[in-house]
Image: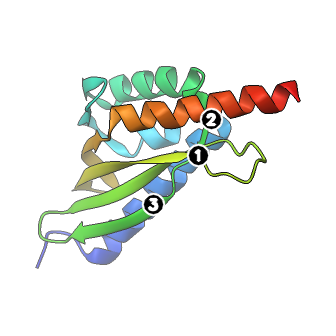
């Protein structure tokens, strides 16, 4: 049996998802950053490693506050797995852009690994994705947005 119950891990992951949605919808990433321990490590394969909740908060606020990342309005989970023995949550997150009303969904997945630390907090997150595909999706979204605005 793991150190934490599946219910506790599920609850923390649900809160994490809600905080990510709030950050995307409102541009306020404080609740999301507060899902991490004070000494957490965040490893984002394209941006590097960040140590500590406040550094994570500063980075995510700056990164997601800048266009076009500020137009990522949701991060639905396609699938997830919980390792109760390790306290890990592994999932596929869809980075979804703002709906342009053209009938298309502009999104690209990333793989996320979270390490649970107890008390509803995570001590580690790692995100990996195909940078080329992510960039191509964003370019498609930008071109469509520009075309629709000119119409």
Q: Which residue is mark 1?
A: 106
Q: Is residue 111 shown above or below 63? A: below
Quick one: quadrant of the C terminus?
Answer: top right
Foreground: 123 or 110? 110
Whole-percent x and y of residue 134? 43, 36
At 48% from the left and 55% from the top, the residue drawn is: 17
Q: Quadrant of residue 147?
A: top right
Q: CA distance from mark 1 to mark 2?
A: 6 Å
- Which residue lies at the image location 26% right of the left edge and 52% below the top edge? 114
Q: What is the basis of the colouring in this image?
A: rainbow
Quadrant position of the N terminus in the picture = bottom left
Residue at 81% of width from left, 33% of height from top?
Answer: 148
Relative to residue 18, is residue 131 drawn left or right?
A: left
Does label 1 or label 3 sit earlier along the sequence? Answer: 3
Pointer 2 residue: 141
Up/down of 89 relative to 122, above or below: below
Residue 26 horizontal/vertical position (percent): 66, 38
Instruction: Inspect this view and state whether residue 29 appears.
Output: no
User: Which quarter of the picture shows residue 42?
Assistant: top left
Front disc: 1 or 3: 1
Q: Nearer the viewer, mark 3 or mark 2?
A: 2
Give the total of numbered labels: 3
| Secondary-structure class at tag 3 | strand
Q: CA distance from mark 1 to mark 3?
A: 15 Å
Q: Are marks 1 and 2 in contact (CB under 8 Å)?
A: yes
Dots 1, 3 in contact, CB < 8 A: no
Residue bearing the label numbered 3: 77
Q: Secondary structure at mark 1?
A: loop
Q: Nearer the viewer, residue 112 or 117?
A: 112
**On the picture, is 132 further left or further right than 14?**
left
């Amino acid at each position: 049996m793991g150190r934490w119950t599946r219910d506790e891990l599920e609850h923390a992951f649900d809160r994490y998802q809600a905080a990510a949605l709030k950050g995307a919808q409102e541009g306020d990433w404080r609740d999301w950053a507060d899902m991490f321990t004070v000494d957490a490590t965040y490893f984002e394969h394209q941006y590097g490693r960040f140590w500590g909740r406040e550094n994570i908060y500063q980075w995510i606020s700056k990164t997601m506050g800048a266009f076009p990342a500020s137009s990522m309005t949701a991060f639905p989970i396609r699938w997830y797995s919980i390792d109760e023995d390790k306290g890990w949550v592994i999932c596929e997150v869809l980075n979804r852009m703002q709906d342009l009303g053209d009938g298309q969904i502009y999104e690209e997945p990333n793989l996320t690994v979270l390490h649970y630390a107890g008390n509803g907090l995570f001590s580690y997150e790692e995100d990996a994705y195909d940078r080329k595909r992510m960039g191509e999706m964003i370019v498609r979204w930008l071109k469509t947005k520009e075309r629709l605005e000119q119409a």
